[in-house]
Image (spheres, coloured by chain):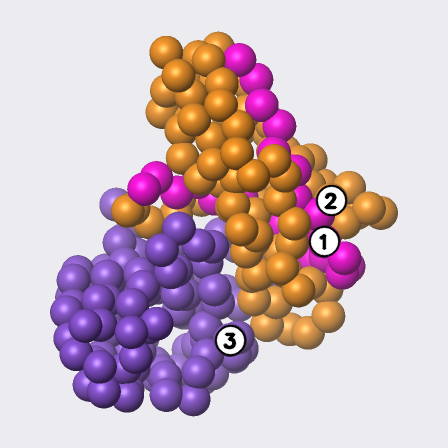
Chain colours: A purple, B orange
Amino acid sequence: DSGVTQTPKHLITATGQRVTLRCSPRSGDLSVYWYQQSLDQGLQFLIQYYNGEERAKGNILERFSAQQFPDLHSELNLSSLELGDSALYFCASSGTSGGINEQFFGPGTRLTVL
Amino acid sequence: QQPVQSPQAVILREGEDAVINCSSSKALYSVHWYRQKHGEAPVFLMILLKGGEQKGHEKISASFNEKKQQSSLYLTASQLSYSGTYFCGTAISSGSARQLTFGSGTQLTVLP
């Protein structure tokens, strides 16, 4: 158990809908990262927050947005969903920003868009 | 830019050794190694920093050639539990955020 929690574990929805994925980092970690992993693919970095502020952006679609709240939990919002958005979405946390510490991954949210 | 991992897949017998390589075309600040079992979250194995510092599990060894921007993960006396997909993640030197870009993975299968 990494100490990172994600909810929900599974999400099934229809095209055009909007969903919110939630992540709580390990106690004390200030950085939260969101990754997308499509079937049998690698991890695609989406976005990073550090202590409430956006720190880095990767290949995140305009239909997707995220935020980190004062209690450090983070939410990833996916809107106007398409079939291709079906994937595992992982959240990870680390104590710092800057690639010098390990990232601890949550169990992921499996999103299925029908 | 995504780092390149090799080989894409490897099959071993228990007790055999394996090396997984990761290379980048950009100057790297750090290389991270993770193992992921099917349907599970990636698990941290090792981080290698520019300048020689390493952090990771005792039973895992790795190297980082800063001149060549290459890293190798060494799995010795493999066990069945080593099976999974190994990903390297690289953070480039420029910029303060240094987010990780992951390679496409190396699928390792250890047979009894």
Q: Is residue A16 above or below residue B83?
A: below
Callouts 2 and 1 close, C-beta under 8 Å: yes
**How far across and down, in percent of the image, does residue A102 sit?**
49, 52
Q: Which mark is residue B24?
A: 1
- Range of magenta residues: B16-38
Task: Name the residue type under label 2.
Answer: Gln
Q: How crowded is the residue under tag 1: few (<14 C-alpha within 10 Å), some, or many (20+)?
A: many
Disc number placed over residue B3 in the picture, else none: none
Residue B70 bears which disc, if any?
Answer: 2
Mark 3 secondary-structure assignment: loop
x%, y% of residue B50?
73, 51
Pointer 3 residue? A59
| Type of amino acid at the residue the image marks with label 1 | Ser
Q: Are marks 3 and 1 in contact (CB under 8 Å)?
A: no
- Residues under labels 2 and 3: Cα distance? 24 Å
Q: Chain of mark 3?
A: A
**Quadrant in the picture for residue A90:** bottom left
Residue at 62 percent across and 44 percent down: it is B5
